[in-house]
Image (spheres, rainbow, N blue to C red):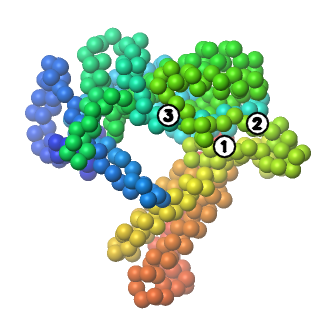
Amino acid sequence: MQLKGKAASGIDKVTKASYAKNLDYNLEQLLTRLHKMAYRPQPVLRIYIPKAGSDKMRPLGIPTLEDKLVQAGLVKILNAIYEQDFIDDSYGFRPNRNCHDALRALSQAVENKPIHYMVEADIKGFFDNVEQNQLITFLTHRIADKRMLRYIKRFLIAGISEDGEHKASEKGTPQGGVISPILANIYLHYTLDIWFEKRIKRNNQGYSRLIRYADDYVVCFENSHDAKDFMQAMIPRLKKFHLEIAPEKTKLFEFGKFAQLKAKSKDTKAATFNFLGFTHYCSRSRNGRGFRMKRKTISKRLTAKVKGYKEWLKASRTLPTADIMKITKAKLLGHYAYYGVTDNYRSINAFTYLINQTLFKWLNRRGKRGCMTWEKFAKLLKLFPLPKPRIMVNLFV
């Protein structure tokens, strides 16, 4: 069973360890119920966990173990069907694709194609607003097996259990379920991707390209009227499928080599945009001769990550120093693995500096005030060295 051994249990309280005690029998019974169409997904257990860097709580959905197993099986089937259908520029939650691939594709488009305008879009609460009947209609285009469609529908309407109260699901995809990402991809494949490729792109007079990671996407354009036409058509198109953009996070703007030159002539800065945790901005190549799109960690994201580390350290300050240093090392490596991309050294270096400052401060609070000096802290770092910031992902390859 490819499930985490320590994964939280759903409303039935069944853990992986307890299920595995009679694994063969449990799986046999599960298959029997599936074949008889007697399997009924249970409501997803909703709990709330602290949101990193914020005072707000983030909702977390926990399906039962058997629901996870059945969903994992459905995901394999759906992947086999839809991988050949999805467009190349859809990167979210797909085999052998990740955020860095999407960032790499964006860099190649902006720097090597005649891109002069961008549309940055954000869909309000996408996963909570997927229209379930419309999703099932989309699935019938490629899936003839009514049994499979019925099981997917059952997962969609299984609902949520919160504080012992069951709430039905009339819209949205299963919270916390492994099937939710591919269902979301299928929904956006029909509502956005195909529409853009078949309708918008074919009618454009200049070059255009949509790059999407789950419900986060940007669109590149050569001509301003193509970009304006897309913006005007996008809102009613999404509304047709019960989706709505966030106006404050959706914009059309000039971007690229000419936008940079215009801004320079007016003694201003060219527009920037956010995508996948990075702020993208116009810049120059190292020799100053060519245009480059560069990126840095979104400021709010960096601040939230530091605040999240501070909150963790505050709650974990009674741990042995060796454990604190080991976990801090893992957190830094995790940060570098995602944010350590081409041109972002300054941001990850700033993150490292702030983590060191926070670590020193809280270690100093564990004992007598002033017990931890910078000299002692330097010796501690020699004993438990922390990884130095480094670029780990080359977006030019």
Residue where numbered disc 3 is placed: 214
User: Would you say residue 281 is visible in this rendering?
Assistant: yes
Q: Residue at x 36, y 29 (%)?
A: 171
Disc 1: which residue: 273
**In the current view of this chain or complex, which residue is farthest to the right?**
265
Task: Pick whichever, 45 or 385, lies toward us.
Answer: 45
- The amino acid beneath tag 3 is Ala
Q: Which of 188 and 246 is in front in this view?
A: 246
Q: What residue type is labelled 1?
A: Phe
Disc 2 is placed on an element classified as strand
Is residue 113 in view from this perspective? no
Q: Where is residue 18 in the image (x, y as percent from the top left)?
A: 14, 46
Which numbered mark, 3 or 2, is in the foreground of this view? Answer: 2
Real-space CA distance between mark 1 and mark 2, rounded to the nearest whole angstrom: 11 Å
Q: Which quadrant holds the N terminus?
A: top left
What kind of element bears circle 1? strand
